[in-house]
Protein backbone atom coordinates (compact mmCIF):
# COMPACT_ATOMS: atom_id res chain seq x y z
CA UNK A 1 0.00 0.00 0.00
CA UNK A 2 1.49 3.22 -1.08
CA UNK A 3 1.77 6.01 1.38
CA UNK A 4 0.09 9.18 0.32
CA UNK A 5 2.42 12.11 0.04
CA UNK A 6 1.52 15.01 2.32
CA UNK A 7 2.60 18.53 1.71
CA UNK A 8 5.09 19.81 4.26
CA UNK A 9 3.64 22.04 7.05
CA UNK A 10 5.23 25.45 6.88
CA UNK A 11 6.94 26.65 10.04
CA UNK A 12 5.24 29.83 11.07
CA UNK A 13 6.73 32.12 13.68
CA UNK A 14 5.05 31.74 17.06
CA UNK A 15 2.96 34.63 18.32
CA UNK A 16 2.16 35.41 21.90
CA UNK A 17 -1.43 36.28 22.36
CA UNK A 18 -1.84 38.98 24.98
CA UNK A 19 -5.11 38.75 26.81
CA UNK A 20 -6.19 41.88 28.53
CA UNK A 21 -8.49 41.42 31.47
CA UNK A 22 -11.21 44.00 31.59
CA UNK A 23 -12.84 44.75 34.89
CA UNK A 24 -16.60 44.87 35.06
CA UNK A 25 -18.37 48.06 35.97
CA UNK A 26 -18.57 48.35 39.73
CA UNK A 27 -21.33 50.47 41.25
CA UNK A 28 -20.27 53.49 43.28
CA UNK A 29 -22.07 52.08 46.31
CA UNK A 30 -19.75 49.06 46.44
CA UNK A 31 -16.69 51.24 45.88
CA UNK A 32 -17.72 53.44 48.80
CA UNK A 33 -18.27 50.43 51.05
CA UNK A 34 -14.76 49.17 50.32
CA UNK A 35 -13.03 52.54 50.55
CA UNK A 36 -14.39 53.38 53.98
CA UNK A 37 -12.64 50.28 55.42
CA UNK A 38 -9.21 51.17 54.01
CA UNK A 39 -6.46 53.01 55.91
CA UNK A 40 -6.39 56.81 55.72
CA UNK A 41 -3.01 56.69 54.00
CA UNK A 42 -4.48 54.65 51.14
CA UNK A 43 -7.45 56.99 50.83
CA UNK A 44 -5.11 59.93 50.41
CA UNK A 45 -3.36 58.06 47.59
CA UNK A 46 -6.63 57.12 45.89
CA UNK A 47 -7.54 60.79 45.55
CA UNK A 48 -5.05 60.81 42.66
CA UNK A 49 -6.79 57.98 40.77
CA UNK A 50 -9.30 60.23 39.03
CA UNK A 51 -11.34 63.37 39.48
CA UNK A 52 -14.39 61.31 40.34
CA UNK A 53 -12.52 59.45 43.10
CA UNK A 54 -11.15 62.75 44.41
CA UNK A 55 -14.68 64.14 44.63
CA UNK A 56 -16.01 60.92 46.15
CA UNK A 57 -13.38 60.67 48.91
CA UNK A 58 -13.57 64.42 49.63
CA UNK A 59 -17.35 64.34 49.95
CA UNK A 60 -18.73 65.10 53.44
CA UNK A 61 -21.02 62.06 53.36
CA UNK A 62 -18.09 59.73 52.74
CA UNK A 63 -16.15 61.50 55.50
CA UNK A 64 -18.94 60.69 57.96
CA UNK A 65 -19.17 57.11 56.71
CA UNK A 66 -15.44 56.54 57.17
CA UNK A 67 -15.65 58.14 60.63
CA UNK A 68 -18.49 55.82 61.63
CA UNK A 69 -16.39 52.79 60.67
CA UNK A 70 -13.39 54.14 62.62
CA UNK A 71 -15.30 54.66 65.87
CA UNK A 72 -16.86 51.20 66.01
CA UNK A 73 -15.95 49.29 69.15
CA UNK A 74 -14.46 46.42 67.16
CA UNK A 75 -11.99 48.64 65.34
CA UNK A 76 -11.36 51.40 67.85
CA UNK A 77 -7.96 50.11 68.95
CA UNK A 78 -6.75 49.30 65.43
CA UNK A 79 -7.79 52.75 64.16
CA UNK A 80 -6.29 54.65 67.09
CA UNK A 81 -2.82 56.07 67.63
CA UNK A 82 -1.07 57.34 70.72
CA UNK A 83 0.28 60.88 70.36
CA UNK A 84 3.21 61.64 72.68
CA UNK A 85 4.33 65.20 73.35
CA UNK A 86 7.79 65.88 74.76
CA UNK A 87 9.00 69.03 76.54
CA UNK A 88 11.16 69.80 73.51
CA UNK A 89 9.71 70.35 70.05
CA UNK A 90 9.36 66.62 69.47
CA UNK A 91 6.02 64.99 68.81
CA UNK A 92 5.76 61.25 68.23
CA UNK A 93 3.04 58.67 67.70
CA UNK A 94 2.64 54.92 67.60
CA UNK A 95 -0.28 52.53 67.05
CA UNK A 96 -2.30 52.04 70.21
CA UNK A 97 -2.60 48.33 69.41
CA UNK A 98 1.19 47.90 69.55
CA UNK A 99 1.28 49.43 73.03
CA UNK A 100 -1.45 47.16 74.36
CA UNK A 101 -0.78 43.90 72.51
CA UNK A 102 2.69 43.78 70.95
CA UNK A 103 5.87 43.06 72.92
CA UNK A 104 7.62 45.96 71.21
CA UNK A 105 6.16 49.11 69.69
CA UNK A 106 7.72 51.56 67.27
CA UNK A 107 7.15 55.31 67.28
CA UNK A 108 7.46 57.79 64.43
CA UNK A 109 8.19 61.51 64.50
CA UNK A 110 5.42 63.97 63.65
CA UNK A 111 5.98 67.31 61.99
CA UNK A 112 3.19 69.43 63.39
CA UNK A 113 2.03 72.75 61.88
CA UNK A 114 3.35 75.90 63.46
CA UNK A 115 6.59 74.35 64.73
CA UNK A 116 8.44 77.28 63.19
CA UNK A 117 6.39 79.68 65.34
CA UNK A 118 7.43 78.24 68.68
CA UNK A 119 7.29 75.21 70.96
CA UNK A 120 4.02 73.38 71.49
CA UNK A 121 2.68 74.37 74.87
CA UNK A 122 0.00 71.73 75.34
CA UNK A 123 -2.39 69.36 73.62
CA UNK A 124 -5.86 70.74 74.34
CA UNK A 125 -7.82 67.70 73.23
CA UNK A 126 -8.77 65.32 70.45
CA UNK A 127 -12.05 64.25 68.92
CA UNK A 128 -12.98 62.36 65.74
CA UNK A 129 -9.38 62.40 64.53
CA UNK A 130 -8.86 66.15 65.01
CA UNK A 131 -6.21 67.25 67.51
CA UNK A 132 -6.30 70.73 69.01
CA UNK A 133 -3.08 72.15 70.42
CA UNK A 134 -1.56 75.44 71.49
CA UNK A 135 1.71 77.20 70.69
CA UNK A 136 2.43 80.02 73.13
CA UNK A 137 4.61 83.06 72.72
CA UNK A 138 4.95 86.26 74.75
CA UNK A 139 2.09 88.06 73.03
CA UNK A 140 -0.61 85.47 72.37
CA UNK A 141 -1.58 81.84 72.01
CA UNK A 142 -1.66 80.27 68.56
CA UNK A 143 -4.29 77.54 68.37
CA UNK A 144 -4.27 74.85 65.68
CA UNK A 145 -6.89 72.22 64.84
CA UNK A 146 -4.98 69.49 63.04
CA UNK A 147 -5.63 66.08 61.54
CA UNK A 148 -2.35 64.13 61.98
CA UNK A 149 -3.55 61.39 59.60
CA UNK A 150 -4.18 63.68 56.61
CA UNK A 151 -1.80 66.47 57.77
CA UNK A 152 -4.50 69.03 57.10
CA UNK A 153 -4.81 71.83 59.65
CA UNK A 154 -6.57 75.02 60.57
CA UNK A 155 -4.89 77.97 62.27
CA UNK A 156 -7.26 79.96 64.45
CA UNK A 157 -7.18 83.76 64.70
CA UNK A 158 -4.99 84.68 67.70
CA UNK A 159 -6.19 86.59 70.76
CA UNK A 160 -3.59 88.93 72.24
CA UNK A 161 -2.77 88.73 75.95
CA UNK A 162 -3.78 91.57 78.27
CA UNK A 163 -1.35 92.80 80.91
CA UNK A 164 -3.70 91.77 83.71
CA UNK A 165 -4.07 88.18 82.44
CA UNK A 166 -3.70 85.69 85.29
CA UNK A 167 -4.28 82.38 83.53
CA UNK A 168 -5.96 80.96 80.45
CA UNK A 169 -7.44 77.50 79.92
CA UNK A 170 -8.80 75.90 76.75
CA UNK A 171 -11.14 73.11 75.75
CA UNK A 172 -11.97 71.37 72.47
CA UNK A 173 -15.13 69.50 71.59
CA UNK A 174 -17.95 68.74 69.18
CA UNK A 175 -21.43 70.19 68.79
CA UNK A 176 -23.47 67.27 67.46
CA UNK A 177 -26.55 69.36 66.65
CA UNK A 178 -24.72 71.90 64.50
CA UNK A 179 -22.17 69.30 63.32
CA UNK A 180 -19.45 71.75 64.32
CA UNK A 181 -16.17 71.59 66.22
CA UNK A 182 -15.58 74.29 68.83
CA UNK A 183 -12.68 75.62 70.89
CA UNK A 184 -13.39 77.16 74.30
CA UNK A 185 -11.13 79.79 75.90
CA UNK A 186 -11.46 80.72 79.57
CA UNK A 187 -9.29 83.71 80.49
CA UNK A 188 -8.88 84.91 84.08
CA UNK A 189 -7.89 88.55 84.67
CA UNK A 190 -6.62 89.94 87.95
CA UNK A 191 -8.50 93.22 88.56
CA UNK A 192 -6.96 94.47 91.77
CA UNK A 193 -8.32 92.25 94.56
CA UNK A 194 -10.84 90.43 92.41
CA UNK A 195 -10.69 88.05 89.50
CA UNK A 196 -12.78 88.39 86.38
CA UNK A 197 -13.38 85.62 83.86
CA UNK A 198 -13.97 86.05 80.16
CA UNK A 199 -15.10 83.13 78.00
CA UNK A 200 -14.89 82.94 74.23
CA UNK A 201 -15.92 80.14 71.88
CA UNK A 202 -14.52 79.60 68.40
CA UNK A 203 -16.63 77.72 65.87
CA UNK A 204 -14.94 76.11 62.86
CA UNK A 205 -18.08 76.87 60.88
CA UNK A 206 -18.34 80.48 61.97
CA UNK A 207 -14.56 81.15 61.93
CA UNK A 208 -14.81 83.77 64.69
CA UNK A 209 -14.22 84.06 68.43
CA UNK A 210 -17.48 84.94 70.22
CA UNK A 211 -17.93 86.10 73.80
CA UNK A 212 -20.40 84.10 75.86
CA UNK A 213 -21.62 84.16 79.45
CA UNK A 214 -18.94 84.50 82.13
CA UNK A 215 -17.56 81.34 83.71
CA UNK A 216 -19.44 80.61 86.97
CA UNK A 217 -16.48 79.15 88.88
CA UNK A 218 -12.93 80.03 89.87
CA UNK A 219 -10.12 78.17 88.12
CA UNK A 220 -6.72 77.79 89.76
CA UNK A 221 -4.89 75.90 87.00
CA UNK A 222 -4.63 76.17 83.23
CA UNK A 223 -5.44 72.48 82.68
CA UNK A 224 -7.48 71.92 79.50
CA UNK A 225 -11.17 71.18 79.84
CA UNK A 226 -12.36 67.60 79.41
CA UNK A 227 -14.78 66.96 76.54
CA UNK A 228 -17.52 64.46 77.40
CA UNK A 229 -20.97 64.05 75.88
CA UNK A 230 -20.87 67.35 74.01
CA UNK A 231 -19.75 69.34 77.07
CA UNK A 232 -16.36 70.75 78.09
CA UNK A 233 -15.79 70.19 81.81
CA UNK A 234 -13.54 71.99 84.30
CA UNK A 235 -12.86 71.47 88.00
CA UNK A 236 -13.38 74.75 89.82
CA UNK A 237 -14.52 76.46 93.01
CA UNK A 238 -17.88 78.22 93.03
CA UNK A 239 -17.09 80.31 96.12
CA UNK A 240 -13.48 81.35 96.70
CA UNK A 241 -14.09 81.74 100.46
CA UNK A 242 -15.36 78.25 101.30
CA UNK A 243 -13.07 76.43 98.83
CA UNK A 244 -15.66 73.80 97.83
CA UNK A 245 -14.71 72.12 94.56
CA UNK A 246 -17.16 71.11 91.86
CA UNK A 247 -17.26 70.23 88.17
CA UNK A 248 -18.76 72.73 85.72
CA UNK A 249 -19.54 71.79 82.14
CA UNK A 250 -20.21 74.00 79.13
CA UNK A 251 -22.85 72.51 76.82
CA UNK A 252 -21.52 73.16 73.31
CA UNK A 253 -24.99 72.98 71.76
CA UNK A 254 -26.68 75.83 73.64
CA UNK A 255 -23.43 77.20 75.16
CA UNK A 256 -24.81 77.19 78.69
CA UNK A 257 -23.24 75.96 81.93
CA UNK A 258 -24.30 73.10 84.16
CA UNK A 259 -23.01 71.65 87.40
CA UNK A 260 -21.98 68.01 87.21
CA UNK A 261 -22.61 66.17 90.51
CA UNK A 262 -19.75 64.44 92.31
CA UNK A 263 -19.99 61.16 94.25
CA UNK A 264 -21.08 61.53 97.88
CA UNK A 265 -17.81 60.22 99.33
CA UNK A 266 -15.68 62.86 97.57
CA UNK A 267 -13.89 65.30 99.88
CA UNK A 268 -15.21 68.66 98.63
CA UNK A 269 -12.10 70.57 99.70
CA UNK A 270 -9.81 68.40 97.52
CA UNK A 271 -9.52 69.27 93.84
CA UNK A 272 -11.03 66.44 91.75
CA UNK A 273 -8.81 65.10 88.97
CA UNK A 274 -11.05 64.55 85.94
CA UNK A 275 -10.43 62.87 82.59
CA UNK A 276 -12.21 61.28 79.63
CA UNK A 277 -12.07 57.50 79.57
CA UNK A 278 -13.85 55.77 76.71
CA UNK A 279 -16.16 58.73 76.14
CA UNK A 280 -17.19 58.91 79.81
CA UNK A 281 -16.29 61.34 82.55
CA UNK A 282 -14.00 59.83 85.15
CA UNK A 283 -12.44 60.98 88.42
CA UNK A 284 -9.13 59.82 89.89
CA UNK A 285 -8.61 59.55 93.65
CA UNK A 286 -5.30 59.12 95.43
CA UNK A 287 -5.00 56.22 97.89
CA UNK A 288 -1.33 56.66 98.86
CA UNK A 289 -0.06 53.51 97.12
CA UNK A 290 -2.75 53.31 94.43
CA UNK A 291 -5.35 55.33 92.57
CA UNK A 292 -9.08 54.69 92.27
CA UNK A 293 -10.68 55.36 88.89
CA UNK A 294 -14.40 56.16 89.02
CA UNK A 295 -16.54 56.49 85.88
CA UNK A 296 -19.83 58.30 85.35
CA UNK A 297 -21.81 55.83 83.26
CA UNK A 298 -24.50 58.37 82.36
CA UNK A 299 -23.31 61.94 82.06
CA UNK A 300 -24.92 64.27 84.60
CA UNK A 301 -26.55 61.48 86.65
CA UNK A 302 -25.06 61.32 90.15
CA UNK A 303 -26.24 57.77 90.82
CA UNK A 304 -24.34 56.48 87.79
CA UNK A 305 -20.89 56.92 89.37
CA UNK A 306 -19.19 53.50 89.55
CA UNK A 307 -15.74 52.44 90.64
CA UNK A 308 -13.97 51.00 87.61
CA UNK A 309 -10.59 49.89 88.94
CA UNK A 310 -7.92 50.44 91.57
CA UNK A 311 -4.51 50.77 89.94
CA UNK A 312 -1.33 50.45 92.04
CA UNK A 313 1.36 53.03 91.48
CA UNK A 314 4.16 51.75 89.29
CA UNK A 315 7.05 51.79 89.87
CA UNK A 316 6.57 54.20 92.80
CA UNK A 317 3.99 56.73 94.01
CA UNK A 318 3.72 59.76 91.74
CA UNK A 319 1.96 63.07 91.92
CA UNK A 320 -1.79 62.48 91.57
CA UNK A 321 -2.20 65.67 89.52
CA UNK A 322 0.11 64.13 86.91
CA UNK A 323 -1.72 60.79 86.74
CA UNK A 324 -4.52 59.97 84.33
CA UNK A 325 -6.09 56.96 82.62
CA UNK A 326 -5.45 56.90 78.88
CA UNK A 327 -7.41 53.94 77.51
CA UNK A 328 -9.50 51.07 78.85
CA UNK A 329 -10.14 47.71 77.19
CA UNK A 330 -13.18 45.59 77.93
CA UNK A 331 -10.87 42.65 78.54
CA UNK A 332 -9.85 44.30 81.80
CA UNK A 333 -6.69 46.14 80.69
CA UNK A 334 -6.13 49.82 81.36
CA UNK A 335 -3.38 52.08 80.05
CA UNK A 336 -2.25 54.66 82.63
CA UNK A 337 -0.02 57.70 82.42
CA UNK A 338 2.03 58.05 85.61
CA UNK A 339 3.85 61.38 85.34
CA UNK A 340 4.89 60.71 81.74
CA UNK A 341 5.46 56.97 82.23
CA UNK A 342 3.03 54.70 80.38
CA UNK A 343 1.92 51.66 82.37
CA UNK A 344 -0.34 48.80 81.26
CA UNK A 345 -2.28 47.25 84.15
CA UNK A 346 -4.18 43.96 83.87
CA UNK A 347 -7.08 43.92 86.32
CA UNK A 348 -7.61 40.15 86.18
CA UNK A 349 -4.00 39.12 86.79
CA UNK A 350 -3.12 42.20 88.90
CA UNK A 351 0.07 42.67 86.86
CA UNK A 352 1.57 45.99 85.79
CA UNK A 353 4.06 46.39 82.95
CA UNK A 354 5.81 49.17 81.09
CA UNK A 355 5.35 48.79 77.33
CA UNK A 356 8.51 48.96 75.24
CA UNK A 357 8.23 51.64 72.57
CA UNK A 358 11.36 52.26 70.55
CA UNK A 359 12.27 55.90 70.21
CA UNK A 360 10.36 57.08 73.29
CA UNK A 361 11.08 57.95 76.88
CA UNK A 362 9.24 59.94 79.56
CA UNK A 363 6.84 62.23 77.73
CA UNK A 364 5.18 65.47 78.75
CA UNK A 365 1.65 64.39 77.85
CA UNK A 366 -0.17 61.76 75.81
CA UNK A 367 -3.36 61.83 73.77
CA UNK A 368 -5.25 59.15 71.83
CA UNK A 369 -6.58 60.08 68.42
CA UNK A 370 -8.52 58.22 65.73
CA UNK A 371 -7.22 57.87 62.19
CA UNK A 372 -9.95 59.55 60.14
CA UNK A 373 -10.25 61.86 57.14
CA UNK A 374 -12.26 64.51 59.03
CA UNK A 375 -11.20 67.89 57.68
CA UNK A 376 -10.78 70.97 59.88
CA UNK A 377 -11.47 73.03 56.74
CA UNK A 378 -14.67 71.28 55.69
CA UNK A 379 -16.87 74.27 56.48
CA UNK A 380 -14.59 77.18 55.80
CA UNK A 381 -12.09 77.30 52.95
CA UNK A 382 -9.02 79.23 53.98
CA UNK A 383 -7.02 81.09 51.40
CA UNK A 384 -3.65 79.37 51.68
CA UNK A 385 -4.30 78.58 55.33
CA UNK A 386 -4.48 74.84 55.12
CA UNK A 387 -2.13 72.15 54.01
CA UNK A 388 -2.45 68.68 52.60
CA UNK A 389 0.65 66.68 53.41
CA UNK A 390 2.14 64.04 51.14
CA UNK A 391 1.91 60.33 51.67
CA UNK A 392 4.40 57.58 51.21
CA UNK A 393 4.65 54.80 48.65
CA UNK A 394 2.86 51.50 48.46
CA UNK A 395 -0.04 52.73 46.37
CA UNK A 396 0.33 50.03 43.68
CA UNK A 397 0.02 47.16 46.15
CA UNK A 398 -2.99 48.71 47.84
CA UNK A 399 -4.60 49.47 44.49
CA UNK A 400 -4.06 45.87 43.37
CA UNK A 401 -5.67 44.66 46.57
CA UNK A 402 -8.60 47.02 46.13
CA UNK A 403 -9.29 45.95 42.54
CA UNK A 404 -9.21 42.26 43.45
CA UNK A 405 -11.58 42.85 46.31
CA UNK A 406 -13.95 44.76 44.06
CA UNK A 407 -13.93 41.93 41.52
CA UNK A 408 -14.55 39.41 44.26
CA UNK A 409 -17.55 41.33 45.53
CA UNK A 410 -18.93 41.37 42.01
CA UNK A 411 -18.61 37.55 41.96
CA UNK A 412 -16.26 37.74 38.99
CA UNK A 413 -13.17 35.63 38.57
CA UNK A 414 -10.16 37.67 37.64
CA UNK A 415 -6.47 36.88 37.77
CA UNK A 416 -3.46 38.89 36.56
CA UNK A 417 -1.62 35.78 35.42
Image (tube, rainbow, N blue to C red):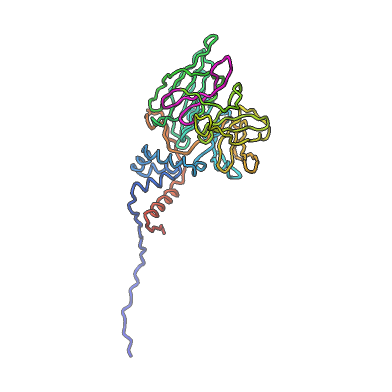
Image check: 314 left or right of 23? right
Q: Is residue 119 at least partly visible in the picture?
A: no
| Quarter residue 181 falls in | top left
Q: Position of residue 249 (x, y in %)?
A: 49, 25
| Quarter residue 21 falls in | bottom left
Which residue is situated farthest in the top direction here? 192
In this picture, is 262 found above or below 191?
Answer: below
In this picture, is 14 found above or below 39?
Answer: below
Q: Which residues are magenta?
A: 227-256
Measuring 62% from the left and 41% from the top, which residue is drawn there? 347
Residue 174, magenta (yes or no)? no
In this picture, is 85 found above or below 140?
Answer: below
Residue 233, magenta (yes or no)? yes
**Of 171 and 298, which appears nearest the observer?**
298
Indicate the quadrant containing the N terminus: top left, top right, bottom left or bottom right: bottom left
Q: Position of residue 404 (x, y in %)?
A: 41, 53
Image check: 90 left or right of 403? right
Image check: 52 left or right of 173? left
Measuring 49% from the left and 18% from the top, which residue is drawn there? 216
Amino acid sequence: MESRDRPPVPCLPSKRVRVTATLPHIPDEIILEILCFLPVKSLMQFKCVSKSWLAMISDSDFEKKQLAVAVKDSGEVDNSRLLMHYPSTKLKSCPLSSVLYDPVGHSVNHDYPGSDLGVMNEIIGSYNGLVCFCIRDKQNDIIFVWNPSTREFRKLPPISFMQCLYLVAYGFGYDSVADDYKVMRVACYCMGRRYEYQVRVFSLKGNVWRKIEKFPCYLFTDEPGIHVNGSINFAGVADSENGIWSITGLDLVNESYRKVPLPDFVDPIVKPMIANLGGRLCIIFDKNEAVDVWVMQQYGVKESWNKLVTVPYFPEPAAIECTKPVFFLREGVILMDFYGLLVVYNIVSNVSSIPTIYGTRYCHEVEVYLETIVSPNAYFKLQGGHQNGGVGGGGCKTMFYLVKKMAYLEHKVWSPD
